[in-house]
Amino acid sequence: MPEKGHYKLVLDGGILEGHDLNDVKTKLAGLLKFDSKKIERLLASTPLTIKKNIDYPTASKYKEALRAAGASCQIERIENNVSDPTPPPLAQIDRLARTGKNQVGKGAEEAAIKSKIRPSWIWYVIAILLTAVPIVFAVIKIPLALFSNLASGIEFTAPGAIEFTIDQPDKYIIWYTTYDGHSHRRDIPQDIKIVVYNPRNERYLNVSAPGWKKTETILDVERQSIAEVVFKQAGVYTIEVSGGFPATELVLRRSLGSGFFNNFVVPILMSLIGPMVGLVIAIFVFIKRSNAKTSLFPTSITRKQERQWAMLSHIGTFSACLIPFGNIIVPLVIWQVKKQESSFTVEHSKESLNFQISLLIYYIASTLLILIIIGFILFIGLFIFNIIIVIKAGIKANEGEFFKYPMTIRFFK
């Protein structure tokens, strides 16, 4: 952890956006207890060190006070370049040995402190598992359900009758082969008659037309649904198909919609919700660990780095093209990670976040109006406007200037 007296506060002569030069001079005069002429000379001779040999928390307090007055300033580490007189050879060897031990001890101390940073890195593993496991489950479950459904079909030749066993009571679909991949295509015969009989209670089951006609293609074979029947009990049944048509293959197969929720809806929802929860956890852990590291090992940020991070809070919103809600995530993370280091970066990231949330609201409104032409026009206009204004904001941030987005609801001030 940095020792006391390793930092200095440097006034760079800049005036923060939204502040008047005369007001800044007046506030600095009251803050530093200088007269106006001395303030004039102070601003003219920048960059100027106004506080040195102070610790980082103290430097941060001075910095915030000066920025509140409208003056731009930076915290810089003091590099100690003053060398001690060269000691005698034996004394020098002894000193180097002691220094090496101190450095080893300091490194071990820092490693011990880092190991205590919370939340633990194990939460990253949990986030990865929450993202990967549901996706793997969906990738396996959905094809397996489809294959199981196709493999469970009972094939028979019609006209004719067969006896078969139902293991899972449910609604079943009867498929008529319209093309077997070899002979010519067949139309569904108009005089086809299907009867399903339960020999246990000597009753006929109700055979009805399908709720909606479906067509399936498996390799070169094409089939069309022609009837559906509900089996309420497991057991042995007889099906008889009659009509004046040539011998054709039919398939009796359990309806895919019967297990649709468990086989398809649940895996899809899991593959969507799991990665979202994992991403939220990963972002939360990253922010908390970054803030903890900054508190334990405070470092100064240069003006150039400050501008780069501010620019990234704007340009990084284009990551939404690859990452869902990346335009919200990027400025939010930069704001939370850099809030202890740079008020300039914080202001830019909050402004970017406010604009992107506002833009999302406008996109939703445009989508609702898509049924009329104006909604489509608004959507395209917002998309183009976003690209132009974000690039402009990034340029302003890189130049060290503040920027206010138009049409923005400022949720965070």
Image: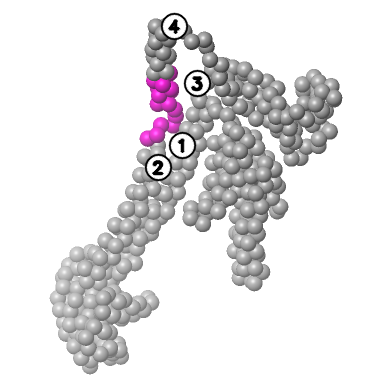
Q: Where 372 falls versus 340 (above or below)? A: below
The crowd level at tag 4 (other Cα within 10 Å; few <14, some 14-19, many 20+) is few
Residue 264 makes an appearance in the image: yes
Q: Nearer the viewer, mark 3 or mark 1?
A: 3
Look at the image and tell me in which quarter the C terminus lies. Answer: top right
User: Which span is picked out in magenta?
Assistant: 105-122
Q: Given the image, on which type of amino acid does mark 2 rest? A: Ala
Residue position for label 1:
285
Name the disc covering residue 273, or none. Answer: none
Q: Secondary structure at mark 3?
A: loop
Residue 340 figure quarter: top right
The crowd level at tag 1 (other Cα within 10 Å; few <14, some 14-19, many 20+) is many
Mark closest to the chain's N terminus, 1 or 4: 4
Q: In the rendered view, does 388 fall on the left or right side of 194?
A: right
Q: In the rendered view, does 377 fall on the left or right side of 206?
A: right
Give the Cα separation between the discs numbered 2 and 4. 58 Å
Rendering coords of residue 114 (x, y %): 43, 26
Q: Given the image, on which type of amino acid does mark 3 rest? A: Met
Residue position for label 4:
88
